[in-house]
Image: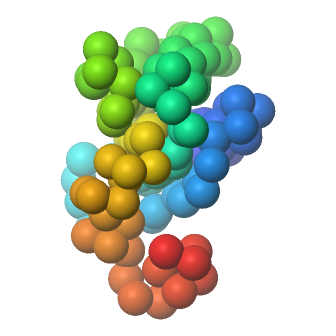
Amino acid sequence: MLLERVLSSLEDDKAESIVSIDLRGKSDVADYMVVCSGRSSRQVVSIADKLVERLKLAFRLSSKVEGKEAGDWVLIDAGDVVVHVFRPEVREFYQLEKMWMSPAERARAGA
């Protein structure tokens, strides 16, 4: 339910290239990681702000947020779901999907 709400919020705010990665059995940090892009620093921050606000309203969840000042890469820790919102160039540089996804998952996601 939390993952579905995260994905819905990102889609509502026109996040691009949204990828959900199942971390169960791979990491104890979270069950899912979601990676997406915003077209500009302003959009990255806006996507993050709205997601945090929606999660607070829907789940009474206080998410931890890092990186909002620069707007290049914002990390939202929502407990079972960790969300990374990048500017496209920064996302390409770090390539988190390649680090966490199996080759089969990357093929399915087009990453």
Does 1 sit above or below residue 34?
above
- Say which quarter of the image contains residue 92: bottom left
Residue 11 at least partly seen: yes
Q: Residue at coordinates 34% horizontally, 18% vertically from top-left?
A: 68
Which residue is nearer to you in this view: 48 or 24? 48
Q: Residue at coordinates 76% horizontally, 33% vertically from top-left?
A: 12
- Looking at the image, how many numbered discs can be counted on the residues? 0
Does 24 sit above or below residue 101?
above
Q: Position of residue 64 (x, y in %)?
A: 32, 20
Residue 65 at least partly seen: no
- Say which quarter of the image contains residue 81: top left
- Tell me if 95 is positioned left or right of 34 in this view: left
Does 35 sit above or below residue 107?
above
Display colour scheme: rainbow
Which image quarter holds the N terminus? Answer: top right
Q: Residue at coordinates 63% horizontally, 49% vertically from top-left?
A: 16
Residue at the right extreme of this rendering: 12
Q: Position of residue 13 (x, y in %)?
A: 70, 30
- Tell me if 92 is positioned left or right of 36 in this view: left
Q: Position of residue 67 (x, y in %)?
A: 28, 24
Which residue is nearer to you in this view: 38 or 66? 38
- Say which quarter of the image contains residue 83: top left
Q: Residue at coordinates 39% horizontally, 19% vertically from top-left?
A: 63
